[in-house]
Image: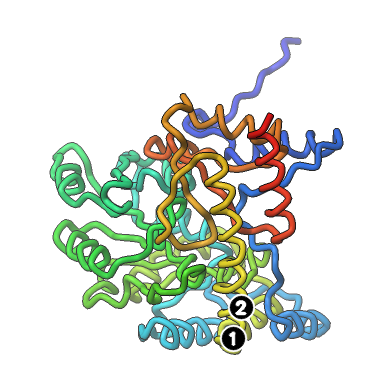
Amino acid sequence: MEKKTFKPADRLANVQEYYFSRKLKEVARLNAEGQDIISLAIGSPDMPPSEHAIGVLCNEARKASAHGYQPTIGIPELRQAMATFYNRWYGVELDPSSEIQPLIGSKEGILHATLAFVNPGDTVLVPNPGYPTYTSLSKLLGANVVSYDLTEENGWQPDFDQLEEIVNCKSLNCKILWSNYPHMPTGAPARRETYERLVQFAQRHGIVVVNDNPYSFIRPDSPHALLSILQIPGAKDCCIEFNSLSKSHNMPGWRVAMLCSNAQFVQWILKVKTNVENGTFRAIQLAAADALTNTSEEWHREMNTNLYARRRFIAEEIMTTLGCRFDPSQTGMFLWGRIPNEIEKVEDLTERVLHEARVFIAPGFIFGSNGERYVRISLCAKEEKMREALERIKQMKKE
């Protein structure tokens, strides 16, 4: 009897395994060989949430009634806490019953928003450089992905002349523009002027602008105001904003995020969401609500400003040692730097740092072609580990 063969869906040919998933396997192998690799590549906060939020999680998890299925729309306590959070920190008023949707992380939101607005063959605009998931999930769902350029010369802000040229191409049916400020990976701060122009662009062309805003609380230099695209008049009618507790509240593994927009957009996305998953564990929702409501300004100042400022100082020394130049005005939990001209390609540097200094830093090409001459250093490592990484790289440079 002839043995049948199996093939994956055609859509898998359009994407690759996530770079960090693949590279972390190599790092794990090197560690198993005793290499003791210091990872400065991943943006996963290494500090815990507030003690009070952890206490709420533990107390609620002990209740016999806490373990059943939860409503996909999220419990009222969490929706109200999210609305209070937006009003307290951004000055944006949202109806917790209709203009907020809790998410199991922003990646889920990217999937659900795309399913709600984009038909196969429609065009999605993604920033280059930018978060790779905007591109990969769009491709998996059969969308046509068109990149718009962000460049150092333009402060990593959109080129609106280029955007106009793209959307005026009659063969493209543009549905969503993905935006992300404060920007990852470059650290470009959010600008009110950029948000105003994005809202005007959305209104003029009938394109939904989705602004991914998980980094606004991470401010090592602390001069930047907390900005949201929803602060712009008219934005709620044509824009969606994601926010997340992963970075701002040290909860990356908890998978709690939020989507904020007008009631119609939220309802369309909820229609997708109810067919894909059930709600988050109740104890996590209540603990997240506590974190959003009760985390103090002092906690944020230490965890999201002072701590990252100390680590940023060491990261700047690492960049300087590598001969990379960087913009000191960038913000967020990474440091983005341009490699020296004499280095032919970025992996010549990152692979040498990995195998000779035993330090893992991210090559910028994984975020798009406009990142090919850059590296990214994560600030999500203890200061002693970052200093050890600095000393290893200094030693590598001497040899």
Cα–Cα span, label 1 and label 2:
6 Å
The answer to whether residue 229 is left or right of residue 110 is left
Judged from the image, the secondary structure of the residue bearing numbered disc 1 is helix
Check the image and tell me how it is coloured: rainbow
Pointers 1 and 2 in contact (CB under 8 A)? Answer: yes
The answer to whether residue 207 is left or right of residue 310 is left
Residue type, numbered disc 1:
Glu
* In this view, 296 is above or below 370: below
Residue at mark 2: 302
The answer to whether residue 46 is left or right of residue 204 is right
* In this view, 5 is above or below 399: above
The answer to whether residue 180 is left or right of residue 396 is left
Could you say where residue 65 lies in the image, as x and y percent from the top left? 77, 84
Q: Is residue 270 visible?
A: no
Give 3 or 69, whichever is nearer the viewer.
69
Tell me if mark 2 has few (under 14), some (14-19) or many (20+) residues whose alpha carbon lies within 10 angstroms of its own. few
Tell me if mark 1 has few (under 14), some (14-19) or many (20+) residues whose alpha carbon lies within 10 angstroms of its own. few
* In this view, 322 is above or below 248: above
Residue for point 86% across, 37% down? 34
The C terminus sits in image quarter: top right
Which image quarter: residue 76?
Answer: bottom right
Q: Which mark is residue 288?
A: none
Judged from the image, the secondary structure of the residue bearing numbered disc 2 is helix
Could you say where residue 127 lies in the image, as x and y percent from the top left? 35, 47
The N terminus sits in image quarter: top right
Could you say where residue 126 lies in the image, as x and y percent from the top left? 35, 47
Residue for point 58% across, 54% down? 315
Residue type, numbered disc 2:
Glu
Residue for point 70% across, 68% down? 47
Residue at mark 1: 298
Q: Is residue 132 visible?
A: yes
Could you say where residue 215 lies in the image, as x and y percent from the top left? 48, 65
